Image: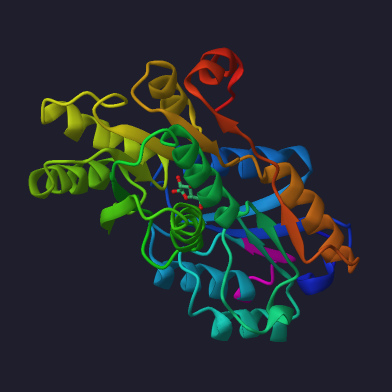
Amino acid sequence: CGSGGSGGASGADDGSITMGFSQVGAESGWRTANTKSVQEAAKESGITLKFSDAQQKQENQIKAIRSYIQQKVDVIAFSPVVESGWDTVLKEARDAKIPVILTDRAVDSKDTTLYKTFLGSDFVEEGRKAGKWLVESFNNSTDPVNIVELQGTTGSAPANDRKAGFAEVIGADPKFKVIASQTGDFTRAKGKEVMEAFLKSNPDIDVLYAHNDDMGLGAIEAIEGAGKVPGKDIKIITVDAVKDGMQALADGKINYIVECSPLLGPQLMDLAKKVVKGETVPARVVTEETTFTQEQAKTALPNRKY
Ligand code: GYE
């Protein structure tokens, strides 16, 4: 650091940048890959990273952000665990003239001057992709299709949006019925537990839609435990496309995965350099993503990085 440098919002005298990053937690394979991507990209771009894990608790994220403000970091980035309740702390950052970048998940603040940009996926579109596959797969039958849904963390952008996009598409045909929908908090353990309860109270489940691979993988254990065959007796759609999910897809236990890329690190560091310099950046940067069938998973698996 330069002698007597002021640090703060404009960066240290020597041009070095310190980023405070508040991560959601370590709840899923996606999250682990995302953390690795952010840490590696910071290193590669010469940005000093202060990293904290909020263990899926908003209060921990607010504490971390306040401590980054006190430490006068040059830029704050965070992946908000839930959408609501950020205005106060974001105003504190703005008052301290520290730019904020949202990564991965959105906030519902009306005041969009509270952050510089939002880098991440279009979760509504992911939900629609899941719904479209389902509609196409069942297009030659008029029989009712009983669906159970494992939602992500309650109040989080991906849970809200993946539910909405899916409901929008399947809502066009009344044969699709969501007979149970509950949160599995994006974790394998909770996915298993909730699926066990679903299986007990619903003898006739045709489809599971899980908002991420990990909950789907937990649910597979529950389905097998109940003596049913995942991917056959119960069709399974998930979101993320992390390695374990892709393996289960290639093995025929999952039927379709909508990709959500966790590799946000390099783009985040580019955006951080720009906002610290005071350059304007797009208000929204959407990640590019695809979808995978079982056959496509077999081809893609050997080169999958996470
Ligand atoms: O899909 C899930 C993770 O916010 C996109 O969070 C992310 C989601 C991801 O726990 O696996």
Residue drawn at x 67%, y 84% is: 111
Residue 106: in sight, yes or no?
A: yes
Pick the quarter of the image with the C terminus: top right
Horizontally, residue 304 falls left or right of residue 150, namely right
Of residues 302 and 277, which is closer to you in this image? 302
Pick the quarter of the image with the N terminus: bottom right
Q: Is residue 219 magenta?
A: no
Horizontally, residue 68 falls left or right of residue 117, namely left
In this rendering, the answer to whether 295 lies above or below 71 is above
Of residues 168 and 55, which is closer to you in this image? 168
For the rendered model, the colour scheme is rainbow
In this rendering, the answer to whether 73 lies above or below 229 is below
How many numbered tags mark residues here? Answer: 0
Horizontally, residue 72 falls left or right of residue 224, namely right
Of residues 269 and 137, which is closer to you in this image? 137
Residue drawn at x 51%, y 51% is: 127
Q: Provide the residue span drawn in magenta.
A: 70-77
The image position of residue 57, as x and y in percent, is 38, 65
Residue drawn at x 42%, y 69% is: 58
- Asked which quadrant contains residue 290, the reply is top right
- Asked which quadrant contains residue 200, the reply is top left
The image position of residue 31, as x and y in percent, is 48, 44
Residue 12: in sight, yes or no?
A: no
The image position of residue 155, as x and y in percent, is 41, 68
The image position of residue 4, as x and y in percent, is 83, 71
Horizontally, residue 124 falls left or right of residue 178, namely right
Residue drawn at x 83%, y 56% is: 273
